[in-house]
Image (tube, rainbow, N blue to C red):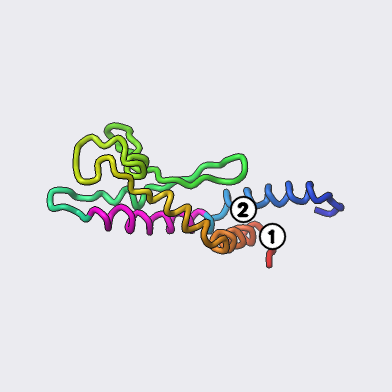
Amino acid sequence: MSKAMSVAELKAYMDKMAKEAMLKGNAVKDTVIQTGQKHVKEDVYDKYPNPRMYQRSGGLMEDWDYKETSDGIAIYSNRIDKETGKNIGYTIETGQGYDYDFEYSGVPRPFIEETRKELASDKRILADALKRDLKNIGIKTN
């Protein structure tokens, strides 16, 4: 970046570098996933403790993925039932699509929404993670 740029060009360049940093780095991904895992525990597991007849796989806690989007990355729960292909995260988030009746059939346990709320409530959390990812691709920030 050796020539003078307009504000619009500078913004486009920084957006491009931020996206590259998030794709190559792990700080933003790890921050979002760890916050999501915390909400799986608090908003799903702790609200419906293991009954004696049900053994949790732990997949909802562990199955997360990301994909590139036009403006960065999307990080999401990737818990899919291997037999049916059903998106388990969506079912738990919305309460819709359970195959059997039980205490939480039809009751949303919005762990994804709670993750979004927590990260939005303190912009520094993701800003600090993005700074670490930018540093990893050679861009210094304050």
First in residue order: circle 2 vs circle 1: 2
Q: Are marks 2 and 1 in contact (CB under 8 Å)?
A: yes
Q: Secondary structure at mark 2?
A: helix
User: Alpha-carbon neighbours of circle 2 within 10 Å: few (<14), some, or many (≥20)?
Assistant: many
User: Alpha-carbon neighbours of circle 1 within 10 Å: few (<14), some, or many (≥20)?
Assistant: some
Residue displayed at 31% across by 48% down: 59
Where is residue 52? Give x, y as percent. 13, 53
Q: Residue furthest bottom?
A: 142
Looking at the rendered image, the quarter that the C terminus falls into is bottom right
Residue displayed at 24% across by 45% down: 104
Q: Which residue is mark 2?
A: 21
Where is residue 22? Give x, y as percent. 58, 52
Q: Secondary structure at mark 1?
A: loop
Residue displayed at 33% across by 55% down: 43
Q: Which residue is mark 1?
A: 139
Label 2 to label 1: alpha-carbon separation: 9 Å
The picture quadrant where one finds residue 46 is: bottom left
Where is residue 21? Give x, y as percent. 61, 53
Compare residues 84 and 39 and report the one nearer the observer. 39
**Left of 88 or right of it: where is 74?**
right
Q: What residue span does the magenta drawing correspond to?
A: 29-48
Where is residue 87? Give x, y as percent. 35, 37
- Give the amino acid at mark 2: Ala
